[in-house]
């Protein structure tokens, strides 16, 4: 296993991965916002429950006084209490249906790699490891209301489309970043916020039997429907309050999430140096784009009954094609590191107009690079392909490609060579020539038009015998005849017409051009009479004859 584990940096600053003041401040703000949301939510829940209990108790103890009013109000309060309480009952499974769980017995090198990296990062080892088809790596867990108290076990997702484009040193940096998240105690805040988000989403967006009951009640007899209208108004108000309050919680949590990303980046830098993670981030843009195009290509191929055997080979080939299309030899490849002053070298440039960060969970790549290289750590990047870490990687790629086909009885895949030939044909389009630098890549031909008829050039008016004769009876007949004689019409019905008009223009069109008729032309072939009118009406070559005779 040691041969597959890239060496780490020789020295690392002592307090490099210590939480910053901004990190701690955002953690407290997120906790305060979350506690405020929980307090408001449970206060409403408790008030509705207490009101319902108090009113029902008064019915029992009041000897029939105000029975109807207390009964209706108590029923409404009980309904609203149950409406809010039902959102607390949920369970979220983190695993996607496309993901494949990996076992230590099947991938011993990978698990030895992960366990050693987790130990070096001071993080717990992953509970389960899943291989997904995406360009991604991340932490996920199963969640329920119980996890507000009991910590959930963390699982690790490794995207095969990510492994397909990285080298071993870059993959180590990406996984070290994820183990940096494993070690963060503030991951609990993220978990609590996510649970609160599930509760809020259940209240705000989900529509179920309670909403069906309210709609049915509101359409009932007018003497009863007003209760449904009133309850609907209260439910709408509760949803609005929950949404407004939770927006503040999300803002605080996303600010904390950005600080967590910065801190996890420093964990990766302490284990792999300051360049490996930056280079991995640089590759992700090309990998994402190529993966999306590979999926689109595979969809078209399956529609033509040619399922792709290896989507990841298509992803790799598309990156190569895009390198040519964009005329950029370093597309999808990080630039070469300079021989000296590497701490000043920057892969990402600041954008002229930065998008607002308040809703973003990840900082901009340029900000992440600046944070990583603030204390530069030198370390060589292992250039071996990351796929070498997986046992029988080709079989995994083919299996993942098969399982991504969403069909009850999928067709057998065609050989990958055939799929690559069709891909080559797609990228042989002249519009994708390198001199255009990708201007027409993915550009729709209808983007500049509003109506279908604008996609076609206007049809020229049908030429008339008068226009032909007007061109043919102009001066310099000899020169015109020579030009016309060199023109060889290919349409058989038009050939006798062209010969007659071009060979003898003066004899063909005697008198004024307006009076010229086909009958005035000599019959130069037996088919002249039969074909002359057909030629005049339908053959577009008339324009060429007129232009050549002018």
Image (cartoon, rainbow, N blue to C red):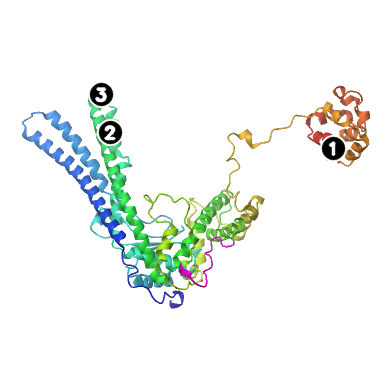
For disc 2, the marked residue is 214
Please tell me whether mark 1 or mark 3 is closer to you in this view. 1
For disc 3, the marked residue is 222
Q: Residue at x 25, y 30 (%)?
A: 228
For disc 1, the marked residue is 548
Q: Upstream in the sequence, badge 1 or badge 3? A: 3
Does residue 334 show up magenta in the picture?
A: yes
The location of residue 345, given as percent across then percent down, is 48, 66
Q: Horizontal placement of 472 versus 86: left or right?
A: right
The local crowd at label 3, few if under 14, some if 14 to 19, many if 20 or more residues have their Cα within 10 Å, is few
Asked if 263 appears above or below 84 in the picture, the reply is: below
Q: Horizontal placement of 380 versus 114: left or right?
A: right
First to last magenta residue range: 329-343
Q: Residue at x 58, y 53 (%)?
A: 306
Disc 1/disc 3 C-alpha distance (Å): 86 Å
Q: Horizontal placement of 357 versus 478: left or right?
A: left
Callout count:
3
The location of residue 42, given as percent across then percent down, is 20, 46
Q: Residue at x 6, y 35 (%)?
A: 61
Q: Upstream in the sequence, badge 2 or badge 3? A: 2
Disc number for residue 134: none
- Per the image, label 2 sits on a secondary structure element best described as helix
- Per the image, label 1 sits on a secondary structure element best described as helix
């Amino acid at each position: 296993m040691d041969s597959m584990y890239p060496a780490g940096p020789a020295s690392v600053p002592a307090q490099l991965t210590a939480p910053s003041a901004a990190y701690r401040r955002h953690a407290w703000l997120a906790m305060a916002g979350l506690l405020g949301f929980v307090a408001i939510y449970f206060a409403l829940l408790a008030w509705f429950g207490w009101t319902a209990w108090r009113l029902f108790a008064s019915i029992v103890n009041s000897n029939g006084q105000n029975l109807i009013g207390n009964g209706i109000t108590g029923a409404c309060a009980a309904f609203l209490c149950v409406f809010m309480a039902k959102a607390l009952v949920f369970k979220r499974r983190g695993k996607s249906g496309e993901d494949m769980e990996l076992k230590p017995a099947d991938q011993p090198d990978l698990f030895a790699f992960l366990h050693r990296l987790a130990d070096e990062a001071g993080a717990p080892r992953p509970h389960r490891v899943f291989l997904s088809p995406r360009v991604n790596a991340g932490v996920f867990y199963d969640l329920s209301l119980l996890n507000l108290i009991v910590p959930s076990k963390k699982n690790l997702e490794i995207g095969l489309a990510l492994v397909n484009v990285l080298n071993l040193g870059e993959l180590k940096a990406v996984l070290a970043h994820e183990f940096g998240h494993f070690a963060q105690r503030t991951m609990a805040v993220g978990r609590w916020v996510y649970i609160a988000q599930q509760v809020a989403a259940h209240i705000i967006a989900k529509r179920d039997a309670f909403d069906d009951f309210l709609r049915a009640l509101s359409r009932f007899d007018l003497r009863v429907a007003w209760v449904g209208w009133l309850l609907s108004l209260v439910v709408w108000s509760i949803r609005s309050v929950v949404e407004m309050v939770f927006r503040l919680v999300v803002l605080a949590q996303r600010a904390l999430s950005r600080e967590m990303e910065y801190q996890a980046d420093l964990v990766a830098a302490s284990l792999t140096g300051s360049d490996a993670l930056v280079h991995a981030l640089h590759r992700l843009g090309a990998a994402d784009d190529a993966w999306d195009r590979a999926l689109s290509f595979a969809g078209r191929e399956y529609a033509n009954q040619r399922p792709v055997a290896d989507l990841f080979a298509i992803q790799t080939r598309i990156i190569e094609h895009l390198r040519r299309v964009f005329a950029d030899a370093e597309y999808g490849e990080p630039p070469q590191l300079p021989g000296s002053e590497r701490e000043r070298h920057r892969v990402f440039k600041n954008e002229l107009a930065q998008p607002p960060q308040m809703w973003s969970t990840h900082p901009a790549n340029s900000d992440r690079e600046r944070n990583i290289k603030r204390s530069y750590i030198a370390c060589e990047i292992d250039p071996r392909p990351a796929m070498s870490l997986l046992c029988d990687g080709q079989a995994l790629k083919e299996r993942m490609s098969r399982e991504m086909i969403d069909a009850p009885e999928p067709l057998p895949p065609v050989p990958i060579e055939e799929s690559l030939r069709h891909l080559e044909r797609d990228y042989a389009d002249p519009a994708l020539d390198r001199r255009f630098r990708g201007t027409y890549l993915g550009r729709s031909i209808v983007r500049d038009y509003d109506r279908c008829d604008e996609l076609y050039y206007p049809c020229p008016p049908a030429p008339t015998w008068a226009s032909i004769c007007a061109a043919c009876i102009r001066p310099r007949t000899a020169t015109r005849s020579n030009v016309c004689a060199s023109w060889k019409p290919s349409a058989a019905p038009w050939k006798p017409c062209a010969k007659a008009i071009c060979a003898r223009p003066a004899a063909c069109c005697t008198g004024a051009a307006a009076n010229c008729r086909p009958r005035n032309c000599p019959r130069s072939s037996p088919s002249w009479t039969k074909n002359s009118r057909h030629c005049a009406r339908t053959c577009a070559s008339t324009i060429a004859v007129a232009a050549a005779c002018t």
